[in-house]
Image (cartoon, grey):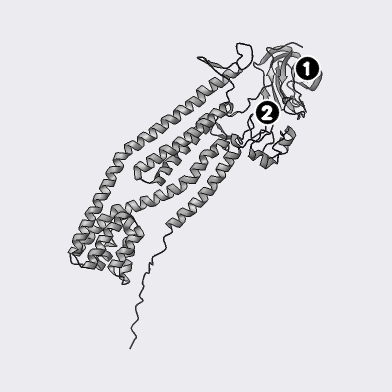
């Protein structure tokens, strides 16, 4: 007689797991606070608050190991990797194409490092190229002269000749001075000619600093915008954003998930009451409902069904469910059901009452959210208007006032200032006002965002989410619009300035 094959029994033990929500929140907070403090540290060590007697911020003195009481020289800056002054390339081309000539020249001025910066003069090499067209092959020369008329570099070639190299000259060091000359001489009439001079220029200002020895960081080209993403001001706003926004965003996501569970909770209670009225036990009713669709509540209903299948009492199951969800609404409803279950009362009526009560509470919360949304819009609109006004002031008003500093006063002195009624504004530093504006916009974002979040949900964490988005908007506006070279203190590059008109040598 064949043995009867034993059936394999599979029991799914979906045991309750430790809730890691708070653990994740604390981990996010720890990392955010650490990075936020690093941002604040970088900001404060590059701001006016920590400027040493040598005029350098604490960050620079620390990284470059400068003596705070000694003004660093150009050579010292060149020895520090973050301050090494990279040369700028100055370009000069003729304002108009040279045509129909035998001999023609152009005078120009060569800028250089200010004598007050350093006694050392780094070499400023110059490279020149030209293109010359004649009706018939012709010998020509392309020559660079110093202010005294001494030739510095010369190229002699022949037009329409494939045996000649391209027109090219170079000189290893153009010293600061006026009335340098570039001259083209041809044996035959030149129909048209052009040239291009390129020279490396050193201004003595460290590459990542402005002309007031404040950190502006490296330049980054992005979609036609020239940005300074590591300018010290950015780290003030980033400090607040990184410290508060990630944790508030995570906690808001947790609360949104809980809210979705609460929205389905009245439906679950109603269906449970209907099955109870139909004569099913609570165990069978819950197990049946585990196959229904309750959105975010599906997992919890399935877990309740599994626990009941293991023989856990219904009262214990719903209490564990209430603890896992952990919201006042669920705790209140489950407390009523648990008491009715222990007292042996008519649970179906309690379930219906709890379902109606929960549904009413969620309805009122929705009404509150809808009524408050208009006020939230007003807060965001007011912040947008405030930010827009600040941007306009920074881009229009401040440059106009700062530009007046270079205008002579009534006494003939430079920097006469802007007359506003009986008040004369002098010596305006644009970056100082940008700093004040940026701090004001950031603090406004913190205040407006906190108010918006508290009105919307009653939670401070939600307010920090709004504040973070406002701060991020301010950072983008300032970096894309306000932080232009003239306002953050980047010295305008001089030019190989040509003299008016040409001359015949």
Task: Report which quarter residue 60 is drawn in.
Answer: top right
Q: Quadrant of the C terminus?
A: top right
Number of numbered discs on residues: 2
Residue 76, x across and y down, in percent: 73, 36
Q: Disc 2 versus disc 1: distance between alpha carbons?
A: 21 Å
Which comes sooner in the sequence, label 2 or label 1? 2
Q: Secondary structure at mark 2?
A: strand
Q: What residue would you read off at disc 1?
A: 147
Q: Secondary structure at mark 1?
A: loop
Residue at screen point 51% across, 22% down: 397
**In the visual, does 485 lie left or right of 280?**
right
Q: Vertically, is 292 above or below 130? A: below
Classed neighbour count for the residue bearing mark 1: other residues with Cα under 10 Å, few (<14), some (14–19), many (≥20): some
Would residue 55 be seen by someone viewing this image from the given angle?
A: yes
Q: Vertically, is 279 above or below 457? A: below
Q: Nearer the viewer, residue 424 or 311?
A: 424
Labels 2 and 1 touching (C-beta < 8 A):
no
Furthest residue to the bottom?
A: 1
Furthest residue to the right?
A: 150
Q: Which dot marks residue 250?
A: none
Residue at screen point 25% across, 55% down: 267
Q: Which dot marks residue 89?
A: 2
Q: Nearer the viewer, residue 124 or 369?
A: 369
Residue 284, x across and y down, in percent: 25, 67
Would residue 47 be seen by someone viewing this image from the given angle?
A: no
Residue 130, x across and y down, in percent: 71, 22
Task: Report which quarter residue 483 is drawn in.
Answer: top right
Q: Vertically, is 399 above or below 27? A: above
Q: Nearer the viewer, residue 180 or 95?
A: 180
Residue 469, x across and y down, in percent: 44, 40
């Amino acid at each position: 007689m064949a043995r009867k094959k034993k059936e394999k029994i599979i029991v799914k033990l979906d045991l309750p797991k430790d809730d890691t929500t708070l653990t994740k929140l604390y981990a996010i907070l720890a990392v955010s606070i650490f990075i936020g403090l690093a941002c604040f540290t970088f900001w404060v060590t590059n701001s006016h608050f920590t400027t040493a007697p040598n005029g350098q911020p604490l960050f620079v003195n620390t990284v470059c190991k400068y003596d705070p009481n000694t003004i660093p020289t150009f050579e010292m800056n060149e020895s520090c990797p973050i301050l090494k002054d990279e040369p700028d390339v100055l370009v000069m081309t003729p304002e108009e194409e040279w045509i129909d000539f035998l001999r023609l020249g152009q005078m120009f001025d060569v800028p250089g490092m200010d004598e007050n910066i350093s006694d050392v003069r780094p070499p400023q090499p110059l490279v020149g190229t030209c293109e010359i067209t004649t009706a018939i092959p012709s010998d020509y020369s392309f020559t660079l002269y110093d202010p005294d008329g001494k030739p510095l570099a010369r190229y002699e070639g022949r037009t329409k000749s494939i045996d000649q190299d391209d027109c090219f000259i170079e000189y290893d060091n153009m010293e600061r001075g006026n009335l340098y000359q570039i001259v083209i001489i041809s044996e035959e009439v030149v129909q048209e000619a052009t040239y291009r001079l390129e020279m490396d220029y050193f201004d003595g200002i460290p590459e990542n600093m402005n002309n007031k020895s404040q950190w502006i960081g490296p330049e980054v080209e992005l979609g036609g915008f020239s940005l300074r993403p590591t300018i010290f001001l950015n780290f003030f706003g980033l400090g607040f954003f990184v410290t508060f926004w990630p944790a508030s965003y995570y906690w808001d996501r947790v609360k949104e998930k809980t809210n979705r569970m609460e929205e389905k909770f009245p439906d679950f209670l109603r269906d449970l009451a209907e099955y109870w009225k139909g004569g099913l036990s609570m165990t069978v009713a819950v197990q049946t409902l585990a196959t229904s669709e309750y959105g975010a509540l599906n997992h919890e209903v399935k877990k309740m069904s599994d626990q009941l299948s293991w023989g856990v009492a219904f009262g214990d199951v719903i209490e564990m469910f209430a603890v896992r969800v952990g919201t006042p609404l669920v705790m209140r409803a489950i407390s009523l059901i648990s008491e009715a279950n222990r007292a042996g009362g008519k649970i179906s009526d309690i379930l219906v009452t709890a379902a109606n009560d929960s549904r009413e509470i969620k309805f009122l919360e929705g009404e509150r959210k809808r009524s408050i949304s208009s006020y939230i819009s007003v807060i965001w609109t007011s912040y947008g208007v405030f930010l827009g006004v600040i941007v306009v002031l920074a881009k229009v008003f401040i440059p106009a006032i700062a530009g007046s500093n270079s205008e002579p006063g009534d006494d003939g002195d430079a920097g006469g200032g802007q007359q506003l009624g009986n008040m004369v504004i002098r010596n305006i530093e644009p970056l100082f006002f940008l700093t004040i504006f940026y701090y004001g916009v950031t603090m406004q974002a913190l205040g407006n965002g906190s108010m918006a979040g508290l009105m919307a949900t009653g939670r401070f964490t939600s307010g920090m989410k709004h504040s973070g988005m406002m701060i991020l908007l301010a950072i983008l506006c300032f970096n894309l619009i306000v932080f232009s070279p003239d306002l953050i203190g980047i010295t305008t590059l001089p030019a190989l300035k040509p003299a008016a008109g040409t001359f015949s040598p």
